[in-house]
Structure formats: structure tokens, C-alpha cells
Amino acid sequence: MTAAQRRHVRTARAMTVYSVCATPVIVVLWPLAEMAQTHGNGNPLWPQTVSLVLLLASCACMGPLIAARMRGEGVPDPRLYAASVLLAWTGALFLREETYMVCALASWLSVMTHLHRGARYPAVLGAATGLLPWIAWPFLHPDSPFAALLFVWLVGALLWGLFYLGCAVSFRLWDIVREAFSAQEAKARLAVAVERLRFTRDLQDLLGQDLNVLAVRAARAGRNVSRDPEQARAEAAEVHALARDALRRIRTAVSGYRELELAGEVRSVTAVLAAGGVRTSVAGLADLDPSPAEASLAAWTVREGGARLLRHGTAAHCRISFSRDPATGRAVVELSGDRARPGADPEPGGADGFADRVRREGGALTAGRTPEGGLLLRVRLPLDGSPSPAGEAR
């Protein structure tokens, strides 16, 4: 996942957390409201204080449950879930006004019903919470008329519906964002896998038959070492000639293939970068007119340079440009990103053989930083397209 994608995910997560956690904050406002009303009447405040503490503890238990729900966990921690239920029910019962009790329960329930992916448990919890004010009515509010409690209960149901809808929208939007970025990551992995499969298939087509012939001839030469040394030497010379011929045909095939497929390689790398959330612009390809050897090294440069930018950078935009040095006539391939991870080394390492391949082919590789702080790779292709002596010796 690129830096831009990580920022989008963090923003979506923060928006979801803020919108969902606003409801638990409202839960604790009801005992505070009753506390202010009770203090104005000169009555003791200890029931409201106990209710506030219990509801705060219930909301604290909801925090890990909300985090688990945002991670996609379908079944919450049963201990935290039960603790939040018991604390919320007990805290609400300490409120002396049925209006505040019903509203606190409705606010709390609107979040709790989203923290379990199943349908049975939220339904049972909702039914039990809805019956709680009626069960407590004869004991805590015996003087309240039935019509008044029914009206308050209906207002609480309406309040629950509004809060429930808001939480449902927030959680659903978060699920969409999370699934979209997961699908994008899967698409990037699939693009890389397809590219590897294509490379493996091409390598098999080029080397498979030649290696089989070499293996058969080498085995026959080994059998003749003791029986007919002269024949064995002749077989060994033939194996050597076949190996040189296979190497020459592989170089020819690869050069011709890359000449035809340089544009396809650019499209493939562009697709891989796009799957990783990186926009790519290409300039100068149509005017380059490369030789077969230039196309081979240019295609390799685009593939390896694009992979390096995706692996070590955090770019949101990548530029691939092709040009010719007017002074020397050498083709130049540049890959650059607009941002890079802090501490990323612009120099290509030797493990992937990128810099070594460029040197063997007679090219020149330079690496550095763009003015925006991103990675910059520049490869000057050999003028005549022929490999260096070191590369030929290998």
C-alpha cells in the first residue's frame, strides 16, 4: 500500500471513529444533564454520580469492541460485550428521571447493536434493553403515569433509530473503504504474479529445448569417457558448440522480443504501478526508435526501475521518459517519483543485479533524488547497443 493509500485509510478510519464515538459521548451527557437539574433542585447527587461512573466504564468497554469491529472481526470479545451491557443497564437504572434513563439506553444501544455481526444477539439485546424501563417502572417510577412513560419510550425509540442510522452509515462506509483498498492490494499482487508468470513462460520457451539437448549430449559424452576417449572429446566439443549457439540464439531472441515488447513492458509496468495506487506518465517512447539491444536494455530498465520505485518509494506519481542525448546520441531512460520513503537509499543495491546488468551491457546508471524528494533512476544506453567486454566474457 502506497503512502497516499495509507493516508486515505487513516482519514477514513479517523472519520469513522469520530462519528461513531460521538454517540458514546452523548451517552454520558444524560447523567450530567440530570446532575445539573438535580443540583438546581437541591437534591443529593450521588445517584447521578454513580450513573456517570458506570456509563463511563461501559463506554470504555465499547472502545476495544469498536476497534475490533473496524478490523472486520464478526464476533466481539464476550467479556467486554457483557461488561458493557451490565454497566450500561446498571448505570441507567441509577438515573431518577425516566427521560434521561431511556435516552441514555437508546444512545448506548445504537452503537452496541453494530458491534456484533450476527442478527440474533443484537435483536435479543435490543429487546431486553427496550423492556428494561418497563421492568424498572413499578420500582423506580411508581408515580409516573403509563402514558408519560410510553411517550418517553417512543421518543427513546426514535432517538435510537436516528443514532442507529448514523452509526450504520459510518460503519458501512468504513467497510467499503477497507474492502476497496484490500481489493486494490490483491489486484497489485495479481499483476505482479502475472508478470512473473509471463517471464517464466518466456524463459522456458527460450531455454527448455536447448537445455534438454545439452543434457543428452553431455550424458553421452560422460558414458564415452572410459570406453572411447576420442569420441568423448568430440562429444564435449559438440556440447560446447551447442552451448555457444544456444547462448547466441537466446541473445538474438531476447533482443528481438524486447524490441517488439518495449511498449508492452511500459504498459505492464504502468499497470502494476496503477494497481499500487501510483499514477504514471510516459514521454518520448514514440520518438525513441531504439535498436534491438537498446530496446532490450530499456525494457529491463523500465521493469526493474518501476519495481524499485514501487518497493522503496511512496510516490503518488511516477514519470517514465525516453530521450537521446544530443551530444552523444545515446538513448536515455529516466524513471522518477514525486516522493520517497524517509531514509530510502537512492543507489540500487547489488542484490537484484540491476546496476551490474547495466554495466555489463555498456550502459551508465546514475541514481539520486528529484527536486520533490523522490527517487530518480537514469540509464544511458550504450551507443552501439553492444555489450561491454566484461559482459561478453560472462
Image (spheres, rainbow, N blue to C red):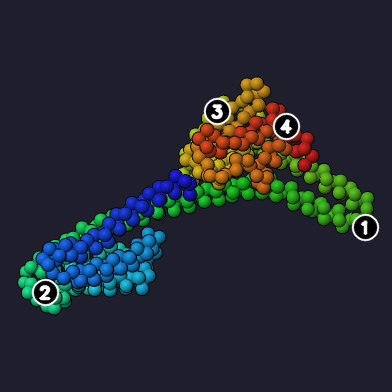
Circle number at residue 141:
2
Q: Is residue 310 visible?
A: no
- Determine the CA span between mark 2 and mark 1: 111 Å
Mark 3 or 1: the one toward you: 3
Circle number at residue 227:
1
Circle number at residue 284:
3
Image quadrant containing the C terminus:
top right
Q: Is residue 393 left or right of residue 52?
A: right
- Determine the CA span between mark 2 and mark 3: 82 Å
Q: Is residue 125 left or right of residue 209?
A: left
Which type of secondary structure does the marked residue at label 2 adopt? loop
Q: Is residue 179 left or right of residue 264?
A: left
| Residue type pointed to by label 3 | Gly
Asked where in the image residue 392 lies, by quadrant, the reply is: top right
Q: Is residue 384 visible?
A: yes
Residue 361 appears at what percent x and percent y?
71, 36
Q: Nearer the viewer, residue 332 or 214?
A: 332
